[in-house]
Structure formats: structure tokens, C-alpha cells
Image (cartoon, rainbow, N blue to C red):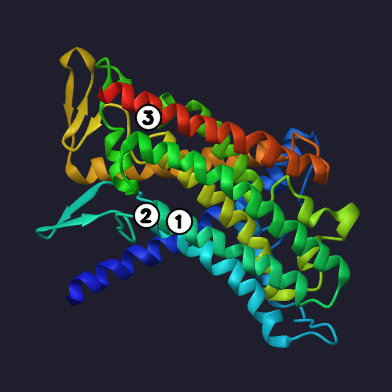
Amino acid sequence: MWVEIGIAAIKTGAILGVVMALAGVFGWFERKVSAYMQDRVGANRCSVFGFAGAGLINTIMADPLKFATKEDFVPAGVDRLLHTLAPCVNFFPVLVAFAAIPFGDVLEAGGRSINLQAVPLNVGVLYILAMVSLSVYGVVLGGWASNNRFSLLGGIRGSAQMISYELAMGLSIVAMVMTYGTLDLQTMVRAQGHLIGGWLPAWGVLYQPLAFLLFLTAGMAETKRSPFDLPEGESELVAGYFIEFSGVKYLMFFMTDFIEVAVVAGLLTTMFFGGWQVPYLMRDGFHFPLGVTVALPHLLVVALQIVSFLLKVVFFGWLQCLIRWTLPRIRYDQLMGLGWKGLLPVSLANVLATAVVILAWQA
């Protein structure tokens, strides 16, 4: 029993560390990669322990140190408990949501088969949807507990946006559940390991390209990223629902955005692009078309799976940052109209079409 507990603790700690590291990487994307895109210098005043510049390590180290040394300002007339609870409610559900996403297949070690998933669940899809949905309470609490009318407006707008786009995002996931016939994310990834016609990887995006576009759009709106960043629109709401937070509390709101980016990237990778799957890589090595086989050690196969998963997640995180710095912010009525009049009907139609195709195939 204690061995299983230790293995679970190691997997959970590794996942939490990777998620925090990914959030730092995406924060660096926001500063330097966006600067390269827009032909400007970007962040260049960062020096930690004698290392100057604005590199990845410095960016990851400087922000937490800066926020940790700032005063924890609490406005007059607010409920201190709720003011402290809001960033925690916003931060922790999103952080633990990543635990159900598989980052590898099975590691054989010491006579044990270790499932490379921090929390193996046969209802992993429901778990992630539940955890991500809980973060809306942090947005509402942050706006209401600040005793600031502009923060309250930001919280209301943020909660309405998140609830609206959760419908389209959930329906796009329903299409994937119908396609694979399971709520288990690990089973979904393993189902994408076979080849179509003997050479084309059977990734989910080939079966559900429309669901992929719907999930990407709704996921970016759910994470409140530009062009859907109305809850924190500086010109209208002065940074929205977390304007009255400082120090570590502000950092938790700030980091939540990038952790949400990592969760969306992880789900895109898992459901639509094979997760940890590497084309033609099986448990014993590569099996290429025309009968070409390359045997590999088990540990190397596992390492390639983990690296494949991380590279895909980083790519989709970069893609979300790329979209953020490419498209302008839309109006609030356009935001809600896109969700209710655009994505929701299309996602419902996609679910209906998926059901018809599955019934026709089974017949």
C-alpha cells in the first residue's frame, strides 16, 4: 500500500511541477515571443542573481520574487476571508484539473505497471469539466469581495462569459466521447494509436475537425484570452475582477490564466492529436509502413512518449499566445453572440451529425 501511495505522490508532484513550469514558459511566450512577432524588444530589464536579460529562467524567477515581496493590500470595507479565498478558488481547481490528463502509456518498473497519469479515472472527462467549471466561483468572488464596482462588473462579465462558452466546449467534448465511446482520457489516447490505411495516424482531429475548432475557440474564451479578454479589458474595467488584489494573491490570478492555457493545450493534445502517441511508435519500438521495424528499450519508448506529449502541449500553448497577439479584442455583445448564436448551434449540430454517422456505421 505504501508503495502505491509513494508512486501516486511522485506522479502528482511531477504533474504539478510540470504545470507550473509550463505556466512560466507561456508567460515567457507572452513577453518575448510576442515582442518578436511585433518587431519590438519586449521585456529586457530582468536580473536575478547576476544573470541579466529576459531569458526563460529569469522570467520564471523574477515574477514570483517580485510579487512575493509586494504588500498584500486589502481594501477597506471588504470581507477579508472572501478576499483571501477568491484567488485560491480560482487557482487550485484549474491546477488539479491537469492531474487526469495522461502524459504517457505504462512504465514497467520493479515488476509493476505504472500508469503514467497522476489520477487514473474512468470518468476523467467529467472530472476535468467539473474542476475547470469551479474556477468561475473565484472570478465571481474576486469581483464581489473587492468592494469595487468596476471589479464587480468584471466578475459578472467574466462569469457570464465562462458559463456561456462552457456549453460549446462541453458539447465539443461530447462529440469526442461519442466517437471513442469512453470518458477515460487514457483510453481515448490509446484508441488513437492505430493507423488508417496502414500509414496515417488515427488522431482525433481527423474524425472530428469541427469539434477541434470549436474546442479551441471555446477553450480560449473560457480562459479569457484575447480576443475574448473582456473581463480584464484595461480600457473598460481597469484590469477587471482582480484590480483590488496585490502580491501573491494577484500572482495566483495571473498564474491561473497560464495554467488554464496549459490545461486547454493538454486537452487539445489528448483528444485531437494523439496525446503521448508518437506516429509508428509501439511499446517495443517503431513499426513503420512496408514492414520496417526498429526495436527500442522500454525506457526510451516511455521517454519518447513523454517528450511527444510535452512538445504538443507547448505547441498549442504557443498557438494560443500567437492568436492572442494577432486578433483584436471584440465587443461584449459580439462575444456573447458568438457563443450563443454561433458556437452553441454549430456544436449541437456536430453532436447530432456524429450520432447519425455512428448509428449508420453500426447499422
Local crowd size for mark 1, using a 10 Å CA cut-off: few (<14), some (14–19), many (≥20):
many
Give, as a three-letter code, the residue at label 1: Ile
In-image side of 27 versus 265 (left or right): right
- Alpha-carbon span between mark 2 and mark 3: 19 Å
Residue 307 image point, x, y percent: 38, 43
Residue 208 image point, x, y percent: 45, 28
Q: Earlier in the sequence, mark 2 or mark 3?
A: 2
Q: Is residue 323 above or below residue 219?
A: above
Q: Residue at x 39, y 67 (%)?
A: 13
SS for tag 3?
A: loop
Q: Residue at x 79, y 61 (%)?
A: 154
- Can I make out residue 68 in this image? yes
Residue 118 image point, x, y percent: 34, 60
Q: Residue at x 63, y 54 (%)?
A: 163
Give, as a three-letter code, the residue at label 2: Gly
Residue matched to label 1: 128
